[in-house]
Amino acid sequence: MKKTSKAAPARAGRLQATQGNASIKLSPVALSVAIALGAPGYAYAQDAAAPTAAPAPAMAAAEAPQELNEIVVTASRGDKTRLQSSISVNDVGEQQILDFTPRSEAEVLRTIPGLNLQDTAGPGGNANIGVRGIPVSTGGSEYVALQEDGLPVTLFGDMQFGNNDYWLRFDSNVERVEAVRGGSTSTYASQAPGAVINYISKTGDVAGGSVGISEGLSYDETRLDFDYGGKIADGLRFHIGGFLKDGKGPTDIPYTAEKGYQVKFNITKDINDGKGFIRFNFKRLDDQEPTYTSMPALASLSGNQITSINQLGPIDARKYSSSGLYNQNFQILNGQGTLQNVQMVGIHPNVTSFGGEFQNDFGADLIVDDKFRWSSISGVFANQWTGEGLTSSVLGSTLNGSTVGSLVYAAGPNKGQVYNSPYVNNGAQAYVTMNDMGSFANDLQISRNFALAPESKLTVKGGWFHMSQNIATDWRINNALLSLNSTNNPVPLDAFAGANGAGAQLTANGLTGFNNQWGGCCGGREYNLTYVDDAPNLNLEFKPAGPFDIDGSVRYDRVQASGSSFSPVQGANITAKDALGSASLPAYYTGSSNTDLVDYTVHYTSWSLGGLWEIDHDTTAFVRASRGGRANADRMLYSGDFTSTGALNAGGLHNAVNFVSQQEIGIKKRGEVNGIRYYGESTLFFAQVTEHNYDFTHNLAIDATYKSYGLENDGSIRWGHFAINGSLVYTHASTDGSGNVPTAMPQWTYRITPTYDVDAYEVGATLNGQTSTYTCCGTYYLMPGNYFVNAFGKVRLYENLEVGVNVNNLFNTLGYRGAGYPAVTGLPNNQAIFDNSAVLGRTVSGSIRYSF
């Protein structure tokens, strides 16, 4: 049976606010993890370094453990191993990610220490991805870039209804995921001063492939994965792979909510006797997936603390869906002013991309590398948010000029009957068309080594990055009333002016209006923008004779923005019909008379300076300081930042660019003691960010300074058939120097993964969790910490044939990782309805895979 090498382990934004001088203690679980992980790089290292009569010789390269030997190709020069790199970097292999049992892209990234993944959000994306205590102020991954093979998926990670995790999927094409935090990301990538996460594809250099099918055993999902690569002729190789997927998904949505595929292909021609290559690649992604943006539970309160999270009557947040048979189709008022029937498709990206890479050593230590990619990207975001409320608060309120006297089921088996349940969903029903999120990117890098003296050299690397990013979207966001009395399959509710469904009908199919969400400010928007980023960059590295080397780099970004945006204005009412009758509903239209022009240029400089000390063959230490810029893009719209000609006014100049400064010192160690192989890496970091942003859902300008410091620990030990790896991260974050803790920012996060692997079978589990965090928005509460356990088992029946079972959330724990907020307070027994993306309940899948 072919084995995969086990490298070290490497997912709807809400306003992030702050509260309290938090005193958050390490939980017993986290403490036990700390004890377990304290050993990998350090307890054994001390044993190895015990005083002896003479210093022990370093292990020979052939005998040294392979951990930290991977060449780092992300946000770096691309010619050094993890051990030799003066940056914080993690590398996670394909099999390790599969064993973690991810159910979304965010869960793929949860294996990387230092990242703060606030929401699960579902397999379609839409996660908030923070790093090193820097909060996500409005949504998306503002300071974190996702890359495929060294080029960004999108120029900006937090585009509204177009976050960067919409547009990529982990599958068997991926050889490994490499992540660099801080440091060099400021100068080796644009718009990513916090972290760069790179999905690195297989290229056929190792012949073979696999085909496998997985089936949800506790839910409806079928997925086929395949990949194959190898040699075509001398110096010519290829790789192809992808997946097909179909099902209702883990929340058992009562229609096919998951359906799609991805195909990726690359072909590589080696040139110059193997000193260079030419590669072309292709990708096609068409994948419809649900998004889990709000899943309610019942919170028990004690002062400003949430003491427990429990099920809300018949509603189980672990399997809750706000979409069902009766709202899978709904109406919007489109940009042409006509009604249109659309489907609740969740997140549905369409990506077609073509690219390539040329790399060659021209001799005299001169290496040229150029990557390019053209992408056609479009898609749809269609989702029903859950706006939890009391039925009693809707009854007696004023809606469309009349007082609500009753709520009536508008569809389903109870159609026409009065709705008497205590809770109601009064939330946004969104249909956003991402007309054009396409891009073109090119990154040219040229490097050369100069010998200065025996055993010392200067390496100069310079280049030019160019990327053009389109952002053209059309928002159609209604307000809708639906039942909130079951885990799934909600029913639209119609409001009537009289009791028991009598009097004037005030809604139709639950809609209270068209494009009327958030007071009509944002329900109907259109914009068509282009951002062009040109960034020359330079890196110098001096390696004198001896154990030290020093590097410095600088990057100059020039971002040009152009286009226009349209805002909604209220027009004539529209008569809408349903099974109960008709209602005259308010409507907001977008028109050319209400236009913001965008036409400006901003530029800024980023820098990074670091040094490495090779203590011995198996131990290095590094220091680094950096300052990186990040331009705000479409989130500046509708905030009053532009003049009538599209230039930036004084406020716009203030808000156009955010800067992240980081300082870090780290140590990396590997070794072997009494047959136990280990490696460990620890990084002490400090981070500061001056944040200027705008949150449209709260009509709130954000102008704050965040500071954080902490310690990232990552390690692994291997003893015979047994291995254990994991991470423990401490983060102390505050806002404006006040000591107030940003929301969704736990002080401790941890992950520990033990595995036992013999020829016939392998079993393992992962415990991952966090300590308490603050909720967001309004009155702030301290949420309890939690942890979740995933597990897997594999049996190798015959050579190359493997049968496996994976379990996510083994103990079916009810909990949340993000900030969330108490949506309804004042309930009996000091309780409240809590809202956020919950961690999915226990899901069990089985798989069979044949490798060849």
Image (tube, helix red, strand yellow):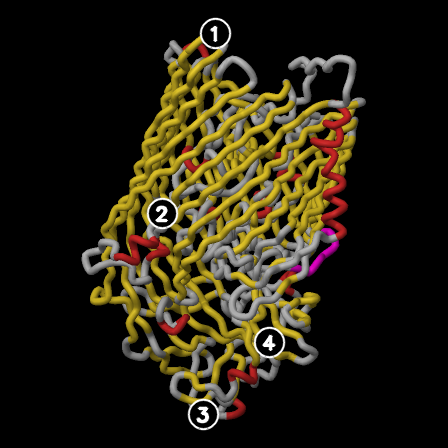
Name which residue lies at 35% across and 79% down: 575
Residue 189 lies, with reference to residue 675, above or below; the image says: below
Magenta span of residues: 810-815
Q: Nearer the viewer, residue 742 or 792?
A: 742
Nearer the N terminus, badge 3 or badge 2? 3
Under tag 1, what secondary structure?
A: loop
Q: Nearer the viewer, mark 3 or mark 2?
A: 2
Under tag 2, what secondary structure?
A: strand
| Image coordinates for residue 350, horizontal then vertical, percent | 42, 47
Mark 1 residue type = Pro
Q: CA distance from mark 3 to mark 1?
A: 94 Å
Is there CB contact under 8 Å for labels 3 and 1?
no
Side of 421 where 328 appears, left or right = left
In the picture, the quarter occupied by the N terminus is top right
Picture quadrant where residue 780 is located: bottom right
Q: Estimate how packed mark 1 is, as few (under 14), some (14 to 19) or many (20 or more) residues with alpha carbons within 10 Å.
A: few
Mark 4 residue type = Thr
Side of 633 where 799 appears, left or right = right
Res. 850 mark: none
